[in-house]
Amino acid sequence: MKPYIIIIVCSVILCSCGEKGRKTKAGQNPVSMKTDITSQYGYNRDFLKSHIKIIELTNKNAAVLIVPQWQGRVMTSSAEGDQGYSFGWINHDLIASGRTQPHINPFGGEERLWLGPEGGQYSIFFKKGQEFIYDNWQTPAFIDTMPYELTSLTDSSANFKIETSVENYSGTRFDLRIERGVTLLDHSQIKKITGIDPEGLNIVAYRSDNTLVNTGREEWKKETGLLSIWMLGMYNPSPGVIVAIPYREGDDKVAGPPVNDNYFGKIPSDRMKVTGTHVFFRADGKMRGKIGIPPARSKGVMGSYDTLNKILTIVICKMPAEDAKYVNSAWEIQEDPYSGDALNSYNDGPLEDGSQMGPFYELETSSPAAALKPGESITHVQYTLHITGMPDKIDLTARKILGISIQEISSAF
């Protein structure tokens, strides 16, 4: 793994981000959860800082931690300062080992950038002619281990880029540039974007702008394969985490079913439930499974509620107005390679041999397939919010954004 060195901004980062003993500000709620030291944000910041260069964005008790070397990914965040809960799942053992693994390096991180599709005749994770099995699956280095260039840094934002190329399963070459920016939002921005009133809540919210540019001489066409921007968030599970996703009503024959649960086999009814307005999914890290929401059913919003730690997490992305197509990442030659899902949630669990990468769970969003002429680009914007604090205020937020109460989420199963 190549080291990533930030010379000019290093002193700025250390000065602005080294407030280990940040106190709860007057008028804000105290830490709402009793966490062990490894679940605290300050501990995880210092752990990462001892192994790799970091960037920390802060505003009062809200903090977002970013690693440029790992594609500018958000590793974790806090809504309550150093002693607050660390929301992102972090693979402490792998990071501490200093090893680089084959296939993928799952360092963790609550918002990381990938590109699709993962499987199929236009996959960028399998070489031409290979069987779609794990031994042949390889995450491209530019979304795994390659560092991104830091292009700008302020107190509230960091921007990155990389230029690279990749070839898909069918032999099509893509010359591309990825531009990524992360912005920590203040209360006025949160209120403007979501319509919720942050007063009485502990909240950390950030926006990421993720742009894919065709830097080559050839147009990207459906007939030879398209790419998409794919955002994956890895979070800490607990026996009380339930994912809740509102969906659009419609005729199954036209819009497709509300949820697709065929990724790793059908999900049992005690782990997934579909009502007339929402899909519920257990995210306890104890059984491997994945669900997807088709584009025609997606409202561009999803969330989870941890009933034990009293954490509401919200992920929002802008859905395109037109009938956009999404890449299909199934590990097979596909009849329709543009029948993919817009939103996904994954629950980690033990494999057949008993091993397990996590445990963690994921909330994922994707852009439409990018049919780009030379010089054209597509941008996928995502908002991530973690909220703790007064239960009645959290409930109002859930009702406002997810269209459902905390009690309804908690009692889904």
Image (spheres, grey):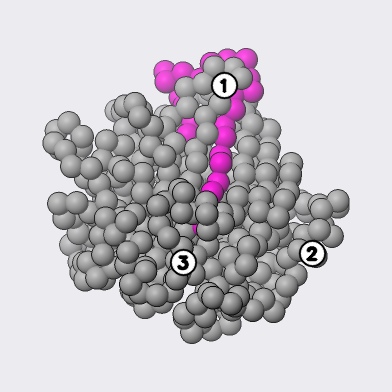
Viewer-proximal residue, 299 or 214?
299
Inspect the image, locate mark 1, and give the three-letter code of the amino acid beneath it: Glu
Specify which label sits upstream in the sequence, 2 or 1. Answer: 2
The residue identified by callout 1 is: 376
Residue 154 coordinates in the image, percent (x, y): 72, 51
The residue identified by callout 2 is: 14
Q: Judge left or right: residue 7 versus residue 200.
A: right
Viewer-proximal residue, 178 or 154?
154
Residue 178 coordinates in the image, percent (x, y): 62, 35
Q: Distance between the residues labelled 3 and 2?
A: 30 Å
The residue identified by callout 3 is: 199
What is the crowding at mark 3: few (fewer than 14 residues within 10 Å), some, or many (at least 20)?
Answer: some
Is residue 88 positioned above or below 121 on the image? Answer: below
Residue 2 coordinates in the image, percent (x, y): 76, 51
Q: Is residue 218 in view?
A: yes
Q: At x 47% / y 81%, what residue is drawn?
A: 33
Q: Is mark 2 on a helix, strand or loop?
A: helix
Q: At x 53% / y 68%, what residue is drawn?
A: 79
Magenta residues, as a range? 205-228
Viewer-proximal residue, 296 or 339?
296
Q: Judge left or right: residue 105 versus residue 382.
A: right
* Residue 304, quarter of picture: bottom left
Q: Which of marks 3 and 1 is in front?
A: 3
